[in-house]
């Protein structure tokens, strides 16, 4: 049983024109993939290739122009907004700027619970403490503001906010880009542990092919809105078919191998 | 030949009434024609070193002291502001971190590039030829860094051009004065692999063809190990380890260097997918809460009682490290 199944997902960005009705400026897709529980999908590609747009389509920030997203067999476009929020959560690119500076972490984490569940305030409090512990923070962090935390901790809060509604899938837009090497491997470890424990599906966008190769089961390679190649990580890294994928993998291999000689 | 020689550079800033050492006794030696990498996490003071070298720190807020800070034998700290500026104009260029933030948003790129051209060469020609000659020099520079569409590039504004081309443009600007040392401050941050290799190849070609030294500041170990000869590892304003990159990668003496090397999954081919990466607990401390002694102490897996005093620099075959209990003492 697939956790998420994306069929022929397309998106056209149109610019309204005064004389002609509209102009298509960007075409995304068609995108096809499926993901089982506990698997990781990585999306790689150059800047402006529509990776972030695909992430937005998945969580429902943008409406696809055609195609279906099936979540455990149900069409996502037919399910209600709160159901969507329960099932798919997102971690944004810049964890610093996606947290509200005027609210304590407790308030930030409480918001999705208040809007999407019917828990009492005591239950919400318990849930927040539980989630904070899950991502390796302490209960007292509820009273902290964003500026009192380090980069790694902020990333943990962003992850806690994504986890708090017990989603089935987490979509992350370059979660490791802004982090330092030692903090980055902490975050990677945390994500892998949570995935093992909770059976999450994890979809992430990254430029760092080393990490992509390490943690993902499947890879989608995108270029100018089109999927040029998709498949198992192992296959793509060892036997790339497409010219662009070859170039990417070769560039990465060259960097890795050049220190040996 | 030694180009830049820095010994015990200390940089202090006043924070709520007390002077805090943001850089604590940094040593850095750059020889002619070498690529020297400066590695460290954010907040470890990499960019501060760059700023201290080019003199971009305001004297009022910062207190800079050094036993030695020389450029080709001339003392940089004793120099007058004007002569130091001249020296930096001619011999040192900096490529800044974020090209879009460091270029003027309201001037076309062509104008910005022509501003930094070597005036000495232009002055010899007749005045009606000057404009043409400037243009030719600018186009030459762009070709040298691999920008083919020079007319478009020269006439457009920074926001109209993609990030990696802008970064190449910054390198072209850095090459304009024919410097002896290029300081590249995290030039590949946030780039995808193809663009990154292009920039790295370009920098190492500049190094080989013109024998320019490069100080490569970054935390991307993969990029560094593909091109650098020497490496200096910084932690929290202290130099942790310096040495030849190959030796350092084969055998690191300091636990922090080892942790850095281990944290990159690309370096370890034997690592099974989805296995746990080795990582250090905690994060880099803030300036307000700097630990005394070895600043790496609280996160160090090998820390002992002695680590509350600052370790002295030790040397083995051109390989400097400062640690009380280095990794190669395992057997003893």
Image (cartoon, coloured by chain):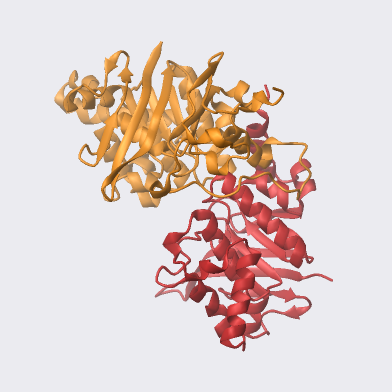
Chain colours: A red, B orange
Percent x, y of residue B157: 33, 48
x 69%, y 41%: residue: A246
* Image: B254 above or below A167: above
Horizontal relation, residue B189 to residue B180: left or right: right
x 51%, y 70%: residue: A142
x 55%, y 64%: residue: A157
* Image: B238 above or below A191: above
Horizontal relation, residue A168 to residue B260: left or right: right
x 32%, y 14%: residue: B72
Query: What is the tally of numbered marks visible in this picture?
Result: 0
In the current view of this chain or complex, which residue is farthest to the right? A1
In the current view of this chain or complex, which residue is farthest to the top? B1
Quadrant (top left, top right, bottom left, bottom right) of the C terminus of chain B: top right
Percent x, y of residue A98: 48, 66
* Image: A204 above or below B67: below
- Toward the viewer: B209 or B325? B325
Percent x, y of residue A177: 55, 51
- Give the quarter of the image for residue B65: top left
Percent x, y of residue B145: 44, 31
Quadrant (top left, top right, bottom left, bottom right) of the N terminus of chain B: top left
């Amino acid at each position: 049983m697939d956790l998420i199944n994306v069929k022929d997902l397309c998106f056209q960005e149109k610019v309204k024109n005064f004389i002609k009705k509209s102009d298509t400026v960007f075409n995304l897709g068609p995108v096809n993939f499926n993901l089982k529980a506990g698997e990781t999908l990585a999306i790689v590609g150059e800047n402006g290739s529509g990776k972030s747009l695909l992430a937005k389509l998945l969580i429902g920030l943008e409406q696809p122009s055609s195609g279906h997203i099936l979540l455990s067999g149900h069409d996502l476009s037919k399910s209600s907004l709160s159901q969507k929020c329960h099932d798919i959560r997102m971690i944004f690119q810049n964890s610093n700027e996606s947290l509200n500076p005027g609210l304590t972490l407790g308030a930030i984490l409480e918001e999705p619970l208040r809007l999407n569940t019917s828990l009492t305030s005591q239950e919400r409090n318990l849930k927040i403490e539980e989630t904070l512990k899950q991502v390796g923070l302490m209960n007292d962090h509820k009273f902290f503001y964003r500026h009192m935390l380090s980069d790694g901790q902020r990333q943990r809060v962003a992850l806690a906010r994504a986890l708090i509604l017990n989603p089935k899938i987490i979509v992350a837009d370059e979660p490791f880009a802004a982090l330092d090497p030692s903090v980055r491997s902490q975050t990677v470890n945390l994500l892998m542990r949570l995935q093992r424990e909770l059976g999450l599906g994890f979809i992430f966008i990254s430029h760092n092919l080393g990490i992509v190769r390490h943690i993902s089961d499947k890879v989608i390679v995108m270029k100018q809105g089109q999927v040029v190649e998709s498949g198992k990580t192992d296959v793509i890294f060892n036997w790339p078919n497409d010219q662009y994928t070859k170039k990417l993998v070769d560039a990465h291999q060259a960097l890795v191998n050049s220190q040996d000689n | 030949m030694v180009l830049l020689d820095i010994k015990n550079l200390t940089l202090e800033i006043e924070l709520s009434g007390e002077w805090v050492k943001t850089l604590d006794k940094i040593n850095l030696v750059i020889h002619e024609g070498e690529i020297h990498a400066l590695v460290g996490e954010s907040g470890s003071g990499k960019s501060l070193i760059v700023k201290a070298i080019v003199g971009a720190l305001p004297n009022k807020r910062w207190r800079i002291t050094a036993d030695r800070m020389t450029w080709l034998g001339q003392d940089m700290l004793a120099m007058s502001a004007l002569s130091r500026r001249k020296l930096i104009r001619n011999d040192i260029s900096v490529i800044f971190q974020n090209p879009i933030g460091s270029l003027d948003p309201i001037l076309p790129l062509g104008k910005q590039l022509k501003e930094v051209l070597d005036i000495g060469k232009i002055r010899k020609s007749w005045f009606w030829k000057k404009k043409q000659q400037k243009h030719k020099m600018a186009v030459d520079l762009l070709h040298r860094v691999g920008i083919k569409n020079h007319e478009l590039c020269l006439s457009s504004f920074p926001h109209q051009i993609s990030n990696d081309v802008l970064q190449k443009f910054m390198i072209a600007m850095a090459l304009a004065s024919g410097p002896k040392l290029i300081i590249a401050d995290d030039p590949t941050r946030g780039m995808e692999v193809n663009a990154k290799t292009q920039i790295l190849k370009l920098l190492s070609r500049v190094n080989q063809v013109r024998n320019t030294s490069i100080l490569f500041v970054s935390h991307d170990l993969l990029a560094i190990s593909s091109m650098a000869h020497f490496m200096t590892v910084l932690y929290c304003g202290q130099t942790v380890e310096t040495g030849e990159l190959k030796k350092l990668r084969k055998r690191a003496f300091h636990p922090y260097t080892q942790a850095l090397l281990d944290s990159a999954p690309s370096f370890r081919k034997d690592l099974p997918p989805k296995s746990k990466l080795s990582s250090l607990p905690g994060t880099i401390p803030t300036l307000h809460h700097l630990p005394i002694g070895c600043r790496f102490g609280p996160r160090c897996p090998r820390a002992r009682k002695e680590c509350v005093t600052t370790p002295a620099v030790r040397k083995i075959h051109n390989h400097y490290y400062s640690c009380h209990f280095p990794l190669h003492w395992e057997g003893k």
